[in-house]
């Protein structure tokens, strides 16, 4: 019964050749990441280790003052030197990672979760799944996102902190809120596209329920960009956390948060550069590392979908 | 004609592209030993399928092959000048000045932020055709010369305000603005409806009558047949056949040309295979398709008085389908013809239950189908399946072929082993290997993707297949194979087909009966031969008349 069909001649050979070339390129891009990416991954792994087990890396109590050894330059004893109160800067950076990195992560998590939910709700309400009254919901959500993004992120965060008062979780909340519109917009647009995609129409032909279509086609395809955005956003959040702490809106003085350390170093920077430079390097390094990883994920993603 | 000096003269042209990145990347030849010439007042057509090198040939004449290419030729002369020594400045003089280029998709080729008057004006200013104060005036003249109605008004419009045919004419006007001796048209009518296609071809032919040379690039032999003086057929970067149009089309010497010609669906190919395995066979000696039994008395799909309109803006609505009725018998193929905007896609959506009709009913196998709550329709969804134009976009981009095919049978609650067994059997039926299951559809060729789409549609064992332009994105030889495959499967399983297409040749090849849609209404219906050979309605007559000669024969 099977009639073997002749393989399509010229065209198929040509296009499958170009396809296999593309696959090879994608595979190459996916396998060995650039050296910068490797460095970034190692740095992030190191940060995670600092957050998880600060005691392993720090030789001193980050809060222990020792006026006798105030403002010592970096040495074998104090790798990154000491600050005005004689506290070991390396140990403070190690314990500070808990604050800077975790608050940054928490802020990014708030943005991702709320932004994604808002984006899906707005995207679906405009589409066939909820119906005509959905347009009102979509408009409402989209406009409120416009309102949030009308304020510069740092200004908005300062506004939130003035209402809630300074503090570790308030600052995460403040930065998190400022980041919501980014995710909401991307996810909404993507949801829009996916709900109108041919493969969603085809799923209906196979008698699949709306819920199954939503779960298996719409959500996974609408959310593909979120991990990439989030990776880049974590870096930005860490920077924002340090910025607000520097201004005194985050964790308060003795806490070894990196932004707080920068603020404390201001008065002594002339005589003790290490008090400001090392926390600054860690902030910069974290931002660059997360951004690099995000961009790498992005190119990998594009490569596999083009 | 032969007395005129050639506008372009190409001899032994070879173009290679660097494969991969880096300085030492090997170069892959995409054109090998191509020779041709075009004279004033003459049309030369280059015909080939995707990947044949026809577009690269055109780009070479404009110096647009890009920095990664190597162009070598024994002779490459443009208006008597040796183009192998051309620098960028020389090429700029040639582009638009000596050679005008018309591309396939006018919506992409025209700047959306500029009026068409400014678009044409740019060419006029660049090549200093008329003084700056007269550009608008000249642009209007040019638009009139390409048959643009209301040119003095249209000149201030943006591309998106024009229909496809008018856009293509605006593009032709800008291509000829500087009075080039040679016009290169790369697939100028591919995205257009037949009646519009005929108008655009007439516009181009008028330029040739005025003494310009035309190099027409097309995958479509029928477009070429009406307008070209000479044809060259390309395959894999090599010219396989060259000669006078009538000679090549009626008496092809090369096996590939013969196969290409016999692959074109038309009235005369009805009931016969298109993709003949034996390329050496005479084009008229065809293999018959397996006979198919139409059970007239068993109606599987019935549409009665269907109407659907859509709201556009406040209080306004547009009627997409108005009072359409038809029936489809078991084993029968119903062709639906219409140009863009005629309502054929809406009709397909109504039959598939994507849209609920405003008025009228659809019955499938004698039971109500639409209007009906989706929940009630769902258990019977397997009876009606869809094959759409672009298979790739009908597959979830994250899924491999096995999951794609399995989705259509999820309601049957097969075990994993049963589902796989069914998928393998169907893949085998459509001529694909089991190894395809683990691949991503995007790594397959266009023809293979459409085969996967057919396998998926067959998996729930439907009675009715809705084919919405299933081959219009495919090359003619791949289209031939897909149409043959559909015909075999239809005969085997007694399937009924609703076959939607803008291509009259395809419809005449596949359909038993035809309905012709225009502006949401059925203007003519009947047996395919009656409607397409002896059309009664003016519109159908215009459609058939717009077909290039060769296909009608």
Image: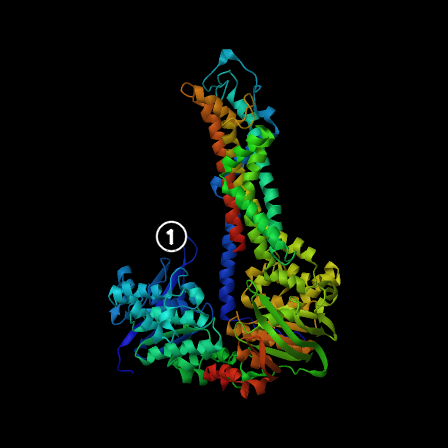
Q: Is residue B90 left or right of residue B439?
A: left
- Res. A48 visible in picture: no
Q: Residue at x 75, y 61 (%)?
A: B413
Q: Is residue B55 left or right of residue B357?
A: left
Q: Nearer the viewer, residue B95 or B221?
A: B95
Q: Position of residue B326 (x, y in %)?
A: 65, 79
In this rendering, is residue A49 above or below A180? Answer: above
Q: Position of residue A179 (x, y in %)?
A: 54, 40
- Secondary structure under tag 1 reads loop
Crowd class of label 1 (few under 14; some 14 to 19; many from 20; radius 10 Å): few
Location of residue B367 by image quarter: bottom right
Name the image quarter holding the N terminus of chain A: bottom right
Q: Position of residue B476 (x, y in %)?
A: 51, 74
* Disc 1: host chain: B
Residue located farthest toward the front when viewing the structure as drawn: B315
Q: Is residue A275 left or right of residue B296?
A: left
In this rendering, is residue A104 above or below B485? Answer: above
Residue located farthest toward the top when viewing the structure as drawn: A68
Q: Position of residue B338 (x, y in %)?
A: 55, 76
- Res. A282 visible in picture: yes
Q: Which residue is mark 1?
A: B23
């Amino acid at each position: 019964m099977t009639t073997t069909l002749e393989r399509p001649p010229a065209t198929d050979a040509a296009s499958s050749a170009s396809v296999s070339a593309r696959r090879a390129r994608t595979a190459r891009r996916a396998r060995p990441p650039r050296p910068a990416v490797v460095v970034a991954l190692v740095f992030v792994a190191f940060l995670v280790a600092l957050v998880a087990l600060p005691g392993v890396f720090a030789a001193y109590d980050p809060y222990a003052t020792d006026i006798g050894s105030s403002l010592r330059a970096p040495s074998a004893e104090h790798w990154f030197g000491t600050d005005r109160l004689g506290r070991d800067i390396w140990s403070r950076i190690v314990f500070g990672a808990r604050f800077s990195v975790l608050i940054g992560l928490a802020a990014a998590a708030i943005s991702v979760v709320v932004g994604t939910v808002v984006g899906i709700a707005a995207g679906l309400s405009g589409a066939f799944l909820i119906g005509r009254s959905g347009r009102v919901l979509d408009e409402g959500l989209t406009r409120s996102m416009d309102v949030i993004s009308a304020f510069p992120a740092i200004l908005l965060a300062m506004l939130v902190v003035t209402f809630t008062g300074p503090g570790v979780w308030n600052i995460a909340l403040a930065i998190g809120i400022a980041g919501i519109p980014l995710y909401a917009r991307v996810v909404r647009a993507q949801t829009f596209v996916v709900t109108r995609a041919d493969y969603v129409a085809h799923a209906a032909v196979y008698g699949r329920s709306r819920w199954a279509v939503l779960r298996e086609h719409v959500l996974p395809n609408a959310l593909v960009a979120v991990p990439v955005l989030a990776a880049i956003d974590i870096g930005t959040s860490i920077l924002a956390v340090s910025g607000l702490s520097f201004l005194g809106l985050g964790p308060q003085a003795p806490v070894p948060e990196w932004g707080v350390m920068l603020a404390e170093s201001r008065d002594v920077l002339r005589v003790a550069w290490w008090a400001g430079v090392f926390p600054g390097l860690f902030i910069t390094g974290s931002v660059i590392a997360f951004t690099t990883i995000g961009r790498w994920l992005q190119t990998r993603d594009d490569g596999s979908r083009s | 004609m032969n007395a005129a000096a050639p506008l372009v003269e190409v001899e032994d042209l070879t173009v290679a592209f660097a494969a991969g990145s880096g300085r030492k990347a090997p170069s892959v030849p995409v054109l090998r030993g191509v020779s041709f010439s075009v004279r004033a007042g003459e049309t030369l057509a280059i015909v080939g399928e995707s990947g044949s090198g026809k577009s690269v040939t055109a780009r070479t004449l404009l110096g647009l092959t890009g920095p990664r290419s190597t162009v070598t030729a024994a002779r490459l002369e443009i208006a008597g000048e040796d183009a192998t020594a051309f620098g960028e400045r020389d090429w700029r003089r040639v582009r638009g000045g000596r050679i005008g280029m018309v591309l396939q998709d006018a919506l992409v080729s025209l700047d959306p932020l500029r009026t068409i008057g400014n678009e044409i004006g740019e060419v006029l200013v660049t090549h200093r055709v008329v003084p700056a104060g007269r550009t608008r005036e000249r642009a209007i003249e040019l638009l009139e010369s390409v048959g643009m109605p209301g040119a003095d008004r249209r000149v201030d419009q943006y591309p998106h305000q024009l229909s496809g045919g008018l856009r293509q004419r605006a593009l032709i006007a800008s291509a000829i603005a500087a009075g080039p001796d040679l016009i290169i048209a790369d697939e100028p009518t591919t995205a257009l409806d037949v009646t519009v296609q005929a108008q655009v071809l007439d516009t181009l032919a008028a330029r040739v009558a005025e003494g310009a040379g035309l190099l027409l690039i097309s995958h479509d032999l029928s477009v070429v047949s009406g307008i070209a003086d000479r044809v060259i057929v390309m395959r894999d970067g090599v010219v396989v056949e060259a000669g006078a149009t009538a000679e090549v089309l009626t008496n092809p010497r090369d096996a590939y040309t013969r196969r290409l010609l016999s692959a074109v669906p038309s009235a005369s190919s009805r009931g016969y295979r298109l993709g003949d395995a034996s390329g050496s066979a005479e084009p008229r000696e065809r293999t018959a398709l397996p006979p198919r039994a139409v059970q007239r008395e068993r109606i599987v799909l019935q549409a009665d008085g269907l109407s659907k309109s859509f709201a556009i803006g406040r209080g306004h609505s547009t009627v997409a389908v108005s009072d359409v009725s038809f029936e489809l018998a078991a084993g029968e193929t119903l062709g639906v013809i219409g140009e863009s905007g005629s309502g054929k896609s809406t009709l397909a959506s109504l039959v598939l239950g994507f849209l609920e009709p405003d008025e009228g009913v659809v019955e499938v196998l004698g039971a109500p189908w639409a209007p009906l709550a989706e929940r009630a329709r769902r258990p019977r969804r397997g009876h009606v399946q869809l094959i759409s134009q672009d298979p790739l976009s009908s597959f979830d981009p994250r899924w491999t072929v096995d999951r794609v095919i399995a989705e259509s049978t999820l309601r049957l609650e097969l075990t994993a082993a049963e589902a796989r067994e069914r998928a393998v059997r169907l893949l085998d039926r459509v001529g694909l290997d089991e190894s395809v299951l683990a691949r991503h559809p995007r790594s397959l060729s266009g023809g293979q993707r459409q085969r996967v789409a057919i396998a998926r549609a067959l998996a729930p064992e439907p009675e009715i297949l809705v084919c919405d332009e299933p081959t219009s994105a495919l090359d003619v030889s791949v289209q031939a194979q897909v149409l043959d495959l559909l015909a075999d499967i239809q005969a085997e399983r007694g399937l009924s087909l609703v076959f939607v297409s803008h291509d009259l040749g395809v419809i005449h090849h596949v359909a038993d009966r035809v309905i012709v849609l225009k502006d949401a209404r059925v203007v003519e219906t009947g047996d395919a031969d009656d409607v397409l050979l002896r059309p009664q309605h003016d519109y159908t007559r215009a459609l058939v008349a717009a077909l290039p000669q060769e296909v009608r024969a």
